[in-house]
Amino acid sequence: MKMAEKKRGIWIFGDYRNYFQNRVTIQLISRARELAAQIDAEVSVIVFGSGIDQYVNEYIAHGADRIYLTDNPRLAEYSMETYSFLMERLARREKPEIILIGATSFGREFAPHVAKRLGTGLTADCIGLDIDEAGLLVQRAPSFGGKLMAEVIIPERRPQMATVHPGIFQELPHDAARRAEIVNVPMPDNMPSDRIRIIGAERCPVKKDNLEYAKIVVCGGRGMDNKKKFAKLYELAELLGGEVGATRPAVYLNWVGREAMVGQAGKQIRPNILFSFGISGAMQFTASISNAKFIIAVNKNPTAPIMRMADVAIVADASQICNSLIAELKRRIRG
Amino acid sequence: MLKLVVCIKQVPQVSDLPWDPDTGRLKRELAAGMMNPACRFALEAALKIRDKIGARITAITMGPPSAEEVLREAIALGADRGLLISDRKMAGSDTYTTSLTLARAIQKNIPEFDLILCGAATNDSGTAQVGPQLAEELDIPGIAYVNDLEIVGNKARVRRLEDDFIETMEMELPGLATINTGGAVPRYVSMRGFQAAFAESDIVMLDAVSLGLNQDWIGAKGSATQMRNVSSPMAGRENVVLTGTTKGILDQLFMLFDDRIGGVIGKDLKTDKR
C-alpha cells in the first residue's frame, strides 16, 4: 500500500511572550490557513518553552492544525541560540514549505539566524502575503520607510521565510472545540553550550511609550521662538497621547533635554503621525523621520525642506498653530 | 590589543530621494550618500571601548566605489583603517549574500577579531538581518538591538530593551552585537580627524576575486530572495499645503484629516457627533 503523501507545511513560530500585548502569532495562523488552502498545506505552530500548555491551547483554538512542542525547564527563558538550534533541527527534519515569524523584536532577530542556518531567504517585516500562480509565497514589504513597496519571492530555496508586521491580519475567533495534533519534540542530548548567558530579563515596570516607539510625536525646533512657547508642545502631546521630540538647535538652546533629540546624533522615530513645529528640516533631522507614516509640518517658510516632504504643509507661525490646535482639540475631544 | 570590526553602510539621504516620475522608482545612483545613522552609533560604541581599554578598529563597508566616503569619515572619527568591498558582480545582494561576503572579508583580513559591531538597522532597506546573519556565517554568538555595551574580562556585557524586557546578557568573544540608535551620542569629526582621513588614510580595496568568492554565490545571482516588483505607493507624500488665517487653517486641517488624526489617537474628532 502506498503511503499517503505528506502534506506541505506552513509553520508559524509561537511567540507567546507578551501574549496579551501582541497577538501576531494568532493573526498569522489565520492568514496561514487561507494560504494553506491554496497550496493544500497544513498549518503548524512551533512552541518552545517551559509549562506553556495555555499557549498551545490558544493556538489550537485559533486555528492551528498541528503543534510541534518542546516543553522543557531549560527553555524557561527565550534564548536566541537555543531556539535557533531547535528550530533549525526541526525544520531540517520536517521540511516545511513556509515559515512565518511575527515581527516582534525577538522575531526580527530570531528569523535571520534561522534563515541563515537553513540556507534560505528571508523577507523582513512584511505587510502582505499571497500565493501566486506558481504556488510561490509573494511577500510584500515596505522599504525606505514605506516610500517603496517591494514584492519579494524566494524562487528556489526552502523554506520560504518572512517576518510579518503585527496587526496586519485579522485573527480567527477563539473556538474551544477545535482539536489539533500535538507532536512532542524532546530536547536533544547534544545541545550546544550557550555562548550567551542571560544575566537578567526584567519586564519593564511601566509600559512607557518612549519617543522611538510612540505612535504620535510632536517635534519642535528653533521656530518655536523660546523655551516658554516650546513648553506648550507638551500640552499638545499630552492631548494627543504622544511624546515630545526636538531638533538639535532646540536641545542646544536648552529648551528641552538631550533625551528628546531626534536626528542623526539623536533618536530615530517612526510615528504614525508626526507634528513638526518650527523645524526647517536639515538633512540630519529629516533622515531620522523618514519612517513617519504621516507628517504635518508647520513653518513660516513655505520653501523649507520639511514643507516639501510633509503630507500636510501649514504655512504659519508654529507657536500660534500649536496654541490654536490645543484649544481646538480640547473642544473636539470633549465634543 | 582588542581587535574591533565595525560594519558600516552608506545609505541614500532619504529626505531628498530622486524619483523617476515615470516608473516611481528611486534613482539610487543620483542620491547623495551618508553614513547610516545606526552605523554611526556602532562606531561610537567601538570608539568608547578603545578610549577606555585600547583597541584597533577596522571599519568595513560593502557598496559602490563612492562608499569609500563613509570609510574616510569613520577614519576621521577615529577608526584605524578601512576595508572597501566593491564589485559590480555584488549588485543586488540580499542579506544572505551580503553576510556571506562580509564574513569572507573579515576572515581574510581580520581573522583574529574579538568583536564585530554593526548598526541595528539601516535607513534604506531596514531589514536588520545582516548583523545576525553575519554572526551565523562566522559561527559566533550575536546579540541584536543593543543599547549599551562594555567589555568585562574576555566577555561583552550588553543591555538592551527587547519586547518590553530589559535584558542584561554576557556574550563570549569573539562575538557580534548590533547597536541601536539612541545610546551614547556619536562624536563629531575633529579637525585633526579630517587630516587623518585624507592624509594617511589606510583603505584597502577588495573584490570578489580577492576574496575568493565564486560569482554564483554573490550579488543577485547568489541571493535567496528575488525582488519581483518595486512600486512607490505614494512616490513622496500628498503634500497638501494649507495657508491663510489660523482659524481657516485649523478648519481645513480637521475637515480633511479629522479621521486620520482621530484614528491614531483613538478619539472621535468630528464636531457633529450624534
Image (tube, coloured by chain):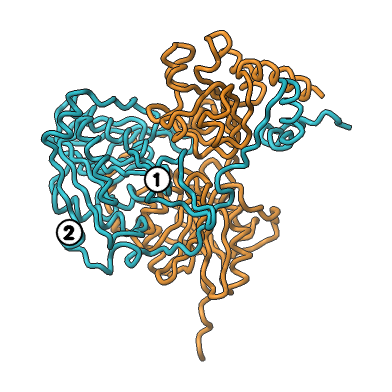
Q: Residue at x 51, y 20 (%)?
A: A221
In the rendered structure, the answer to whether residue A106 lies left or right of residue B99 reads: right
Badge 2 amino acid: Leu
Tint applied to chain A in the drawing: orange
Residue B203 coordinates in the image, percent (x, y): 15, 43
Name the front one of labels 1 and 2: 1
Question: Could you classify mark 2 by the number of other residues whose Cα lies within 10 Å: few (under 14), some (14-19), or many (20 or more)?
Answer: some
Q: In this orientation, which residue lies closer to the viewer: B226 or A208?
A: B226
Residue A255 coordinates in the image, percent (x, y): 49, 12
Do the residues marked 1 and 2 share a common chain? yes
Q: In this orientation, which residue lies closer to the viewer: A62 or A71?
A: A62
Q: Chain of mark 1?
A: B
User: Disc 1 and disc 2: Cα gap in Å?
Assistant: 29 Å
Q: Residue at x 33, y 43 (%)?
A: B10
Residue B217 coordinates in the image, percent (x, y): 28, 66
Q: Give me the disc on residue B211.
A: 2
Q: Chain of mark 2?
A: B
Q: Give me the disc on residue B31.
A: 1
Q: With respect to residue A155, does B250 lie above or below?
A: above
Q: Residue furthest right?
A: B274
Q: With respect to residue B166, does B108 lie above or below?
A: below
Disc on the earlier residue, 1 or 2? 1
Where the C terminus of chain B falls, by quadrant? Answer: top right
Q: In this orientation, which residue lies closer to the viewer: B138 or A123?
A: A123
In the rendered structure, the answer to whether residue B198 lies left or right of residue B169 reads: left
